[in-house]
Image (cartoon, grey):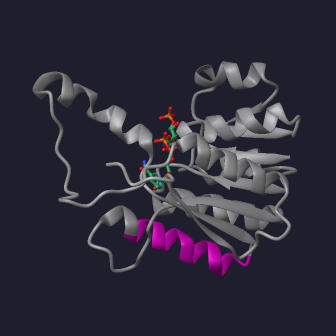
Amino acid sequence: MILVTTAGKVGSEAVRLLRGRDVPVRVLVRDPAKVTALADAGAEVAEADLDVPASIDDAMAGVSAVVLVSPAVPAQELNVVRSAARAGVGHVVKATSKASADAPIARRRWQAEIEAGLAASGIPHTLLRSNAYMQNVLALAPAIAKTSSFGSSAGRGRSGLIDARDVAAVAAEIAAAPAGHAGQTYWLAGDRADV
Ligand SMILES: NC(=O)c1ccc[n+]([C@@H]2O[C@H](COP(=O)([O-])OP(=O)(O)OC[C@H]3O[C@@H](n4cnc5c(N)ncnc54)[C@H](OP(=O)(O)O)[C@@H]3O)[C@@H](O)[C@H]2O)c1
């Protein structure tokens, strides 16, 4: 059984892909009403909250691999790591970004804190260190509609955005067959620097 924490952009697609391969998968969500399509595709749905360790332990029963993807609040993801360690989970695939303990950007420091906790847990794991998701651009739609433009702090820089569904495809592949991926970090990006 593979546990996918949360059914956001990456999690929901990972669940869909795993079910497409007939892999047993459970998705951890706060609100099961939001994931009826995943349940219809054969996913088990575990109602839980990443802030509530006992609810994570319930979702972790019988799990061999975890796809760890969430808003990446350290206390929450470290709750999952500790629960996975208690349950003897064999592999964690962690969605992360360009993490660094001294980054000026808080979310990158948070990811570094989570990665350190995951390493300290001793659970075999794989890091998906992705570039920015293409779906972020959709969040600019209201500004574009209002001003016909959008702002970014990239200067003249360009980045190879990646579709969150491609991140999900990598996560699903590794979770379904983790052999050879333990201790690996994969830098996922689009194949062109467009934006
Ligand atoms: N966006 C980027 O450009 C980018 C780039 C690289 C890496 N990443 C990494 O990707 C990860 C985010 O993945 P994503 O974009 O797929 O996430 P997302 O679409 O933002 O979805 C997050 C999900 O977390 C759920 N959630 C929030 N708090 C929860 C809680 N306390 N308990 C249970 N569920 C909870 C939300 O469900 P509700 O419906 O209940 O709110 C939501 O479905 C982060 O680690 C981020 O650093 C993102």
Query: Residue 8: where, in percent of width, then height?
Result: 54, 37
Query: Residue 142: where, in percent of width, then height?
Result: 23, 26
Query: Residue 94: where, in percent of width, then height?
Result: 62, 60
| Foreground of the two, 49 or 185 | 185
Q: Residue at x 36, y 56 (%)?
A: 159
| Foreground of the two, 170 or 110 | 170
Please say if 5 is above or below 84: above
Please say if 102 is above or below 50: below
Q: Which residue is drawn at 83% across and 49% down?
A: 61
Query: Residue 102: where, in percent of width, then height?
Result: 33, 80
What kind of secondary structure does the magenta stretch mostly adopt?
helix
Horizontal arrangement in the rendering, residue 11 relative to residue 41 (left or right): left
Say whether residue 57 is magenta: no
The residue segment tinted magenta is: 109-122
Total numbered labels: 0
Q: Residue at x 26, y 61 (%)?
A: 157
Please say if 98 is above or below 64: below
Q: Quadrant of residue 79?
A: bottom right
Please say if 118 is above or below 151: below
| Foreground of the two, 103 or 81 | 103
Q: Residue at x 79, y 56 (%)?
A: 65
Say whether residue 110 is magenta: yes
